[in-house]
Amino acid sequence: MKTWYGRAIQTLDGMARAAQGRQAIPMRSLETLASDVVASLQETDELVVEALSGPAGSPLLTNLLNVSILGTRVGIGLGYYGQELHRLALAGLVHDIGVFAVPVGLLTKSGRLTPEERSLIEQHPERGFEIILACDPACHWLAEITRQAHERWNGQGYPHRLKGRQIHEMAQICGLVDVFDALVSERPYRPRLFPHEAMKELLLTERATFPREILKALVEQLSVYPLGTTVRLTTGAVGIVVKINSRYPLRPVVKLIGSESEAGVQSHELDLSLTPLIAVVETLKPPVTGQVQPGKVMPGPHVSSPATDASDHFTSLLESLDAIASTLQEVVQTKRRPS
C-alpha cells in the first residue's frame, strides 16, 4: 500500500509528464497536495522526518515534494498562516517545474556543461513561468515565484540577477530549502550529507546568498539535528532526537537508547537545553522514517532556576544566527588542527 508520500510523488510525476508534453498541469491535484502538506505539518513533523530520510525515487520529483514540506515548515517559523502558508506549500511543489522542459540529455549529462548548455538550463525558471501562466493566468503570483526561485540575495542567481528585496520572499524560501534538500539527498557524483552537516555548510558558505531571517528560520525549524537523527553525547550515551528546541538548535531533546537507558536512568528523555555540560558530539545515522514518533517543535525552555555561567554563555551564543555560525566555524577549525 502506497504511503501518502508515494502517492504525492505519483501526482508530481503526472505534472512532470504534462509539462514535458506541453499539456496543462493538474493544478487542482497540486492544490490538494499543498493543503495536505499544511494540514500535516500543523499537527506533527512526520513529513519533515520523511523528507529528511533520503526517500527513494526520482531526485527531480522528491526535490519538489521535499521543498514543499521543508519550505512550509520554514514558513511556519516565519509566521505564515492561512492562504499565505498554502501558497508557499504550492510554490514548493512547482518551483522547478520548468526543468521538465529542458532536454533530458542535458539534465543527465555526466561531463562538464558548455557555456551554451548552462545558459539553456538557466532559462528553466522562465519555462516554468510560461507553463504556469499557460495553465491559469490567475496564477501569475505562482508563476513569478517559480521564475525567481533561483535568484539570490547577493545578485548571483539567475535568470535575471535580481538581488535583495527584488526577490519574492517565498522564492527565497524555496531557493534556500532547494539547496538544503540537494545537500541531504544522494547524488551519482557524491554521497548525501547528514542534515546537521548540510546545515553547517549553509551557515558557513551561503550566508550572503540568502537573507538572514530565512536562514535563521531554517535552523530553528529543522534544527541542526532534525527529528529522528541518531546522535552520540559527550557522556558516550547514544540517543534519537525526538523534539527540537527552536531557541537552541544545537540542543534538542534526545531519547536515550542502548545500555544507558536499559540501566535504569531516571528519564529516558534528556533535554540538552537544560544540561549545559552535556552536548551532541557526533551524528551516527540520518533521520529514518518510523524511527521516532514525530513531535512538535518546542519553544525555548522557560526555566526559573538560576543559570550557570556555562548556560548563560551558551544562551548568548545562540541568540543570533551569526553566533551560531561562529560556533560551528570554531568546531570545524578545531577538528582540522593536528593533535
Image (cartoon, grey):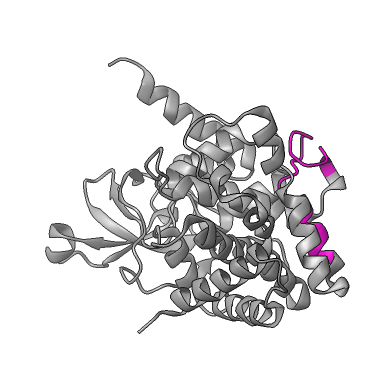
Q: Please tell me whether residue 296 is drawn above or below residue 272 in the rendered image.
A: below
Which residue lies at the image location 62% right of the left edge and 45% below the top edge?
319
User: Picture quarter containing residue 158?
Assistant: top right
- Relative side of 114 to 226, left or right: right
Magenta part, dominant SS:
loop
- Measuring from the top left, give residue 314's x and y in whole percent: 50, 42
Query: On the rendered image, what quadrant is the C terminus found in?
Result: top left
Q: Please tell me whether residue 333 is drawn above or below residue 41 in the rendered image.
A: above
User: In front: 178, or 153?
Assistant: 178
- Measuring from the top left, give residue 137's x and y in whole percent: 87, 72
- Relative side of 124 to 318, left or right: right
- Relative side of 179 to 293, left or right: right
View extreme (top): residue: 338
Q: Which residues are magenta?
A: 141-164
Residue 135 in sight: yes
Which residue lies at the image location 77% right of the left edge and 71% below the top edge?
84
